[in-house]
Image (cartoon, coloured by chain):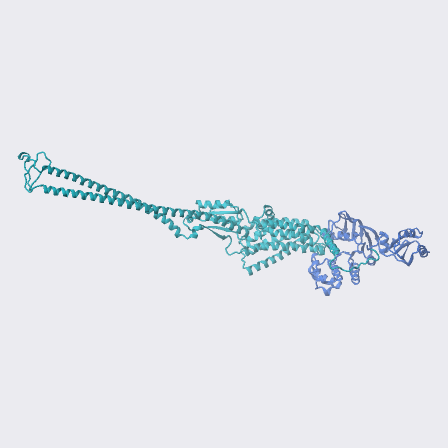
Chain colours: A blue, B cyan
Amino acid sequence: MSNKITINKKEINNKEINNIEIKNLTKKFGNFTAVDKINLTIKEGEIFGFLGPNGAGKTTTISMLTTLIRPTSGTAIIAGHDMLTEDVDVRSIIGVVPQSFSLFAELTAQENLEYIGKLYGMSTNSIKDRSEYLLKQVALYEHRDRIAGVFSGGMKQRLSLAASIMSNPKILFMDEPTTGLDPQSRIAIRELTEQLNSEGMTIVYTTHDMEEADKICDRIVIMDQGKIIADGTSDQLKHLIMSGHLIEVRLGLEEKRDMHNVIQELKKLSFIKSVVYNKDVLNITVDTKVGTFYSISDFFHKKNIIIEEIQYKEPSLEDVFVHLTKKELRD
Amino acid sequence: MKPNEKIHRKEKIVDFRKIGAIIQKNFVVMTRDKVRLIPLLIFPIVMILVLGFTTGNSPKHISTAIVVYDDSVLSQEIQQEIANSQTFSIKHVVSTEDEARKLLDKGDVRVIIEIPSNVENDVNNNIPANIIVIVDESDSAIAGAANQGLNIIINSLSIRISQEKMQVYQQSVDMAAQRMAGYTNTQTAYYNSMTASTSNNIIAEKSVAASKNILDQYTNNLLLSIPPSSLLVIPHNDTVQIFMNNQTPQNTDQNFVAIESPVAPQIRAQASILQQSSALMGSAENSLAASSAVSTKSVQSDKKLQETYAQNVVQSLHTIKIFTHSKIENVLRPLVLTNKSAYGTNKRAIDFLIPSLIALTLFQGAVMGMGRAVAGEKRDGSLTRVFLTPTSNVTIISGTIIFYVLFELVRAAFLIFVAVMLFNTHIEGSILLIILILAIYVSISIAIGMIISSLVRTEQQFTSMAMLISLPTMFLAGAFFPVQAMPKVLQAIASVLPVTYGGEALRGVMIKGFSIGMIMAPLMVLLLFLVALLTIVILVFKRDIE
């Protein structure tokens, strides 16, 4: 009887509580604050993206959520388990695809999966079935008896993904899983991720590839310097800067010219909301499309600056990021 | 950069600026990693200190038990010499070898010296006396030092004893010579006195002959003076009576009147001569008797002296004979050092080296293995992957330790196999006990490796730290250099190294055939190490991969 009640309770908990609830999560390394008081809720069944440049605090956040490092303060409740006090429970229900290969180069693909399966306490039979299934899923079944050390980057990453989902976790953390991979491998990983999600797995995905996040993430937070600077769906984030229209201008600058004053003057024009520039490319947000092209052309003409190209542009997440942080993503 | 400046200059074979840049880069790379750099810098200092103090010294004050079967003056003298030496420190004086061997087994003493019974008698009789030294050959440095030290003592004692003996010999020879001289003198004196006595006799004979002559003369004269027929005149009160023709006078006093014969004066004169002659004869007789007495006395006393001298000479000759009959090397080496191995006589250096070698090899292997198993897997992330599974630290640590224990046991088996096959080493003790010791010992080594790997971030740092621990261990373990010869500080360090106790326990079982009870002391120390180090491992082994 008591057993049944417990099970019921658990079911209720799982239904009622969001999969991940991050509370004031902070990590400091000495004087450096890698993650600064993050508050966040990740819902069950989402593909949730952490977006941001290198050093933004994405990996540190993932490492804390996956119990690899302890936070300086704050905590997170993962599927009803406090990651600080119930770290073993957390580990048994999550899967992690780490940034690096993190498998045993001396073992074959099959042996790696079997080893991980055993560490999850799976039975021999389920290990056999699951590894066969997963090896087929990641298209490594043919290579199952080759040692992982000789695999290509894409194969390694697929094997890593297979190892991460050996235990069929409820939540899968993927830390920049496509970084450094060729386009085909990226697509393969992305497709597998979407498939897993469609089977009900919650995915927490970090990337610095805006396009990728845009494509697969249901919800995205943008991190910079340890803080969340934006939170929402791809469209919601884009709408942050969609209160106007975006014009991209490429200038033909003959030599280095002090653009600072030019930009300051440009900003004084009434219809311009903001200007972000990088070398000879300007991203200008404007109120209205009426007369804008002419006004901008006229402005630069008077300054004796040639416009090589001028066009309207749909904002990308990168634009959102640039807009929010006033800096380029890949710096 | 100026617009016209060329980037691609001609490549020089030796470009000092670039060499400088490379040097600078390497310097910066090296100095950034303090955890790796500091051990690298400390390492040579440690090596020179350890090697400087470990080599070239021989052990001093070796704990020693003396077995005394003889309480003679010489025996005490030998004990005193041993006590005075720097090499030995007498901890126990016992009366049987068994007692001493128990002390050796317990490790209370490292050397047994036996002074045999009859040592003094044997030495006096020029029979070489065996001083026995029993050493634990597994402790080759101690064994060597003990042998050497005792050799010096025995040699110096031998030299002294044989010098004393030679002195006695010299004295005997001198005395014999003296006595021979005395004997010769007496002989001469005897001869002289004999000669003297003979001349006295000759004189006496001569005087007797002279007297006889005189007497003969007188008798002739007297016979001549008496006429063939004569009156018989007998003076009344005269002393001279004359008897003629054998007639015996009767009642002469009354019947005859004394008439002085005309020849009376002549007779008186003759009588006087007779008297004189008689006196001469007496004196001659006396002289002869005296001479004879002197002679006899002289001969008697000479004979006695001669006897005494002859005895002395015989004695001297006997002493000399003893010397001449004993072998000269026995005289020169009254004490002989016999070396016995405490545990079997067929053990060679290699046999004793093997336990130490196993202890060292396994320590190195186990510690260094952790470089790959923990530091390396941390670096390549495979340990991280394990951390991500619901697997406890204790499980991870246990799995790692058990594997490496098995692995190192296999390595030990290889080592022992080679030793048995190639060097004919004989394993005396129980294999199970050896495995038990190795398992505990390897676990300790692994724990040390794990602690180091928990303190470092990279495999390079690990290697650097591990070297700092494992190489001094090699030298302080006593396998290659005697710990007893080292300064107290290094001895103290050696006494807290697991390898010291691992080696001791292994030697005990493998070479001396000790049972578990006999290696309890090192085994307990090893267990204490194990418990303490495993506790530390569990405390420092963090999942935190910062």
- Residue B197's place in the image compared with B6, above or below, is above
**What x and y, as percent, mark residue B85?**
51, 46
B145 lies left or right of B398: left
Name the residue furthest left. B255
| Number of numbered tags placed on the structure image | 0
**What x and y, as percent, mark residue A148?**
71, 61
A264 lies left or right of B190: right
Q: Can residue B303 be seen here?
A: no
**What x and y, as percent, mark residue B500?**
59, 50
* Along the line of sight, the residue nearer the viewer: A239 or B408: B408
* Along the line of sight, the residue nearer the viewer: B210 or A221: B210
Q: Can residue B408 be seen here?
A: yes
Residue A153: image quadrant is: bottom right
**From the image, which quarter does the N terminus of chain B lie in?**
bottom right
* Along the line of sight, the residue nearer the viewer: B289 or A111: B289
B52 lies left or right of B325: right
**What x and y, as percent, mark residue A178?**
78, 59
